[in-house]
Amino acid sequence: MSVLRQVHLVAASMVFFAFFGAHFIHPNLIYLALLVGVGLTISGSTGVCPMALLLERLPWNKGKSYGGEVKVEVTKSSCCR
């Protein structure tokens, strides 16, 4: 599973838990949803996702990247002379 997909899964789970937790456990758990919203705002405005940076450090994600910036190298092939 890609890191970006893991970010979506964790963020959605945190928001889900925040709303149900605020209703059934303690009302202050709603601030967990606020934390997720702030993280998504940072990610959208800067292109750097703090949660993805943390998830990349997990053992099963070694060598993977969340795909923030992708560089494409264009080479001239023999068919395009």
Image (cartoon, rainbow, N blue to C red):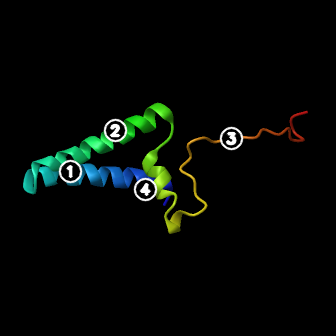
Residue situated in front as seen by the camera: 73 or 51:
51
| Residue with the mark numbered 2 | 38
Label tally = 4
**Circle 2 or circle 4, nearest the eye:** 2
Residue 71: mark: 3
The amino acid on which the numbered mark 4 sits, given as a three-letter code, is Gln
* Residue neighbourhood size for the residue with mark 1, other residues' Cα within 10 Å, grouped as few (<14), some (14–19), many (≥20): many
* Residue at the (35%, 55%) spot, across then down: 10
Does 45 sit left or right of 22 as displayed? Answer: right
Vertical side of 5 occupied by 45: above or below:
above
Choose between 41 and 28: the one closer to the eye.
28
Q: Nearer the viewer, mark 2 or mark 3?
A: 2
Give the residue displayed 25% in from the left and 49% down from the top.
15
Point out the tag, 2 or 4, that comes first from the N-terminus: 4
Measure the C-alpha gap from mark 3 to mark 4. 22 Å
* In this picture, residue 79 sits left or right of residue 1: right
Amino acid type, label 3: Lys
The location of residue 39, given as percent across then percent down, is 37, 41
Marked residue nearer the N-terminal end (2 or 1): 1
Residue at image mark 4: 6
- Residue that sits furthest to the left in the current view: 24
State the separation of the CA atoms marked 2 and 3: 28 Å
Q: Nearer the viewer, residue 9 or 34?
A: 34
Q: In front: 29, or 15?
A: 29
Given contact means CB atoms under 8 Å apart, are the residues at marks 4 and 1 in contact? no
Q: Position of residue 75 (x, y in %)?
A: 82, 40
Residue bearing mark 1: 18
User: Which amino acid does the dot numbered 1 rest on?
Assistant: Ala
Q: Residues within 10 Å of mark 3 (few under 14, many from 20)?
A: few
Q: Are marks 3 and 1 in contact (CB under 8 Å)?
A: no
| Element at label 4 | helix
